[in-house]
Image: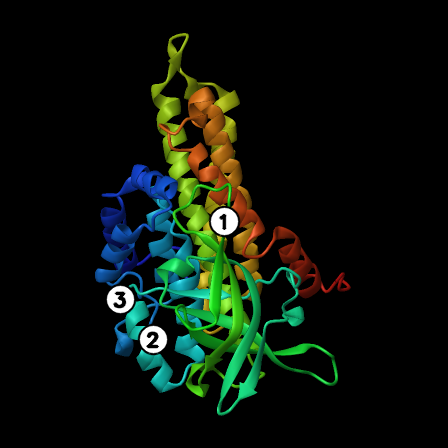
Amino acid sequence: MSFLESAELQLLRESVAGIAGKYGHEYYVRKSRAKEPSSELWDELGAAGFMGVNLPLEYGGGGGGMTELAAVCEEVSAVGCPLLLMLVSPAICGSIIARFGTPEQQQRWLPGLSNGKKMVFAITEPDAGSNSHRISTVATRHGNGYRINGQKYYISGVDEADAVLVVTRTSVDDRTGRGRLSLFVVDTDAPGLGRETIDMQILEPEKQYTLYFDDVEVGPDRLIGAEGEGLRPLFEGLNPERILTAALVNGIARYALDKAAAYARERSVWGVPIGAHQGLAHPLAKAKVDVELARLMTAKACWLYDNGHDAAEASNMAKLAATDAALAALDQAIQIHGGNGMTTEYGLATLWGMTRLLRIAPVSREMILNFVSQHSLSLPRSY
């Protein structure tokens, strides 16, 4: 693993920043307040091939990996436009289908994902929480296909997507009593699929939904991987989600630190820039250190994933480190701005809700610490 980015990766970052920089945080705020998708930015990035940079070349992708996709995600966030759906459409759904789909399934969905079409991911349920084995959404055999019944919660951007990758229970393991999981691609306009908007106190262009599956029928061609063996593709997809979450908040942190440092250099009180005072300079410097450490762990997680190694530990650590560091950096940036930090004009408090959300989701820091306790330190399992 090299700590120096290649010229190609640097050029990718510059190209993405050039597109996203034309939109900026004011665009993001405007779209969020109107609850409109950030379609113009997403579509331009998709047309340039950046939304499928991690997908195989033979299906219209860029042939890169999580390193390249994380760079795209981070650079878009670094101009104040965090795109939440990047965590699920190219990262989870694209990665799972690329690794576990049949050639026919890959040909059916990957070219669209490579060009920026959206597929969302549905795993969360009101009663299952972090325990995937308690998923109650069930897919039962019906003819040569399946019928899906159940409910999913906090599903992002369903109104923007053509399809949703749904995690279901298809049977129960007689030995453990745990549900055997299976993954299906369901069209968002499928008969029997209903949705209800969840009202969120977060400034984001994406809407959150509760989904209701009422005898939603799918054919056998919609099953990704083998029936009852969905746990492996599921967790293979969740590592990219954690990595992209880290990349997204790393970008938010960079955005906040850039604005804070510029303000601290320019804002003068009693004849000197406020950044000359250690009471402001040192907390900002500490935030910079923590953000760079989080970016290093994110790069390590990308490298492990792209090179076929177990990336679970690094992905979880990157997600925890990055969300903690980003929230601290954003808070310090707001503090340096004083009252201005809470205004829409200065573009900082408008990102607090998103950053705080990602400290909870898609996996909470408590569950990450449980993972590290058990798998990294060999401590007794606590749940």
Q: Is residue 2 visible?
A: no
Q: Residue 138: where, in percent of width, then height?
A: 59, 76
To which residue does mark 3 refer? 115
Q: Is residue 337 visible?
A: yes
Q: Is residue 19 left or right of residue 287?
A: left
Give the residue type at disc 2.
Trp
Assess whether mark 1 and mark 2 are in contact (beta carbons under 8 angstroms): no
Q: Earlier in the sequence, mark 2 or mark 3?
A: 2
To which residue does mark 1 refer? 294
Residue at 32% over, 39% down: 30
Give the number of the disc on residue 109: 2
Q: CA distance from mark 2 to mark 1?
A: 33 Å
Q: Seen from this angle, which residue lies furthest top?
A: 270
Q: Residue 195: where, in percent of width, then height?
A: 48, 61
Q: CA distance from mark 1 to mark 3?
A: 30 Å
Give the residue type at disc 1.
Ala
